Amino acid sequence: MQKLLEYYSELEALLPSQGPGFSAAILCAGETLFERHHGLASLELKVPLSRDSAYYLASESKQFTAACVMSLVREGAISLDDDVCAHLPELTKFEQPFPLRSLLNHSSGIPDYFQFLQCQLGRHEADYFNNDIILQLISRMDTVECPAQTKHRYSNSNYILLATLVQRLSGMTCKDYARKTLFEPLCIQEMTYDDDRFDVIEHRVFSYESDAARSSGYKQHLGNANTVGDGGMYASTAQLLLWEVEWHRQWADHSSLLHAMLQPSPFLDGAVPDYRFGLEITERFGQEVVFHNGGLWGFNTLIVRLPQSRTSIIHLANCQNAEPDMDRILSAALT
């Protein structure tokens, strides 16, 4: 613990208190051992970061999308080896099946939509997009990067499609299904997918980038999307700590939804990827480590679980300078 405290003290020292910063928390055996919030959630309004500050989680959101999908699998709405094309006609031009598990573990070979957005002539960085726009883009694709279930090819397109699948199978938006299935049973009220650009999200954090040419020294990132599934979740450390208590409870229950998400899902050649369903599992310093991270628009997020010690480390940042150093965090926690 002392090494982790030193890491965050050093990070604080690098960041001005009146600039963007980070929130960090450590949970162990159900108790919050450490919590630190440094910097501002809004430079314009001089609002300090706190345990209630709602950060954009970026790709950290994928684990919640996967949990929604696996809940539907358990309900019998679909199975892991079913071809999702029956529910996703947007994939027609590929002229091949895609088992559900290939979307969950990024082995579908469907290209990441971001590369296509960046190639569009006349497109500006601030141009808006949402799930409907991305689904139209995917519907024009016809070539995979690799045959399904042969290689790991991380693609945000997979999780846009999974969020759409949740809606079509449940009759509810992914936002509403996650709230009803995942969050309300735990009395988690504020964690939510941002699927409407006009919605008010209490305690919303804004993100920034250093820019010496500006009088403030920072440029504000203006989020230009409401995509759900691949990202879209907003959450605070206070809400995530509640989630992590439940995460470790489920780890101890091998019949839980979590263990269904972490089950090995081999490629066709028998190789088992570290990336499971919205989570990655690996080993460091002789201990199992389960994690996911995310980064977009200046937001940088990391949630690391160390199941053997029932520990979770949460790191949320609203600028690149406060990006979590996973290697150092794990070294500090495990040595």
Image (cartoon, rainbow, N blue to C red):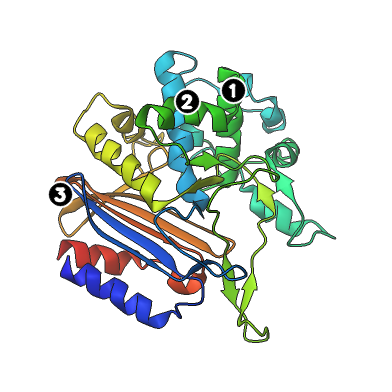
Q: Which numbered marker is on residue 244?
A: none
Q: Amino acid at mark 1?
A: Met
Q: Amino acid at mark 2?
A: Lys
Identified at 37% across, 39% down, the residue is 276
According to the picture, the residue beneath numbered tag 3 turns out to be 309
Q: How many other residues sit within 10 Å of disc 2, few (<14), some (14-19) or many (≥20)?
A: few
Q: Amino acid at mark 3?
A: Ser
Is residue 272 visible to the viewer in this orientation of the structure?
no
Q: In the image, 118: left or right of 313?
A: right
| Image quarter of the N terminus | bottom left
The answer to whether the residues at label 2 and label 1 have Cβ atoms under 8 Å apart is yes
Counting from the top left corner in percent of width and height, residue 64 is at 45, 37
Counting from the top left corner in percent of width and height, residue 140 is at 76, 38
Q: Secondary structure at mark 3?
A: helix
Q: CA distance from mark 3 to mark 2?
A: 30 Å
Q: How many other residues sit within 10 Å of disc 3, few (<14), some (14-19) or many (≥20)?
A: few
Q: In the image, 209: left or right of 284?
A: right
According to the picture, the residue beneath numbered tag 1 turns out to be 172
Q: Nearer the viewer, mark 3 or mark 2?
A: 2
Counting from the top left corner in percent of width and height, residue 287 is at 17, 52
Counting from the top left corner in percent of width and height, residue 291 is at 34, 50
Query: Which mark sits nearer the N-terminus, 3 or 2?
Result: 2
Q: How many other residues sit within 10 Å of disc 1, few (<14), some (14-19) or many (≥20)?
A: some
Q: For this rendering, which residue is in front, 250 or 153? A: 250
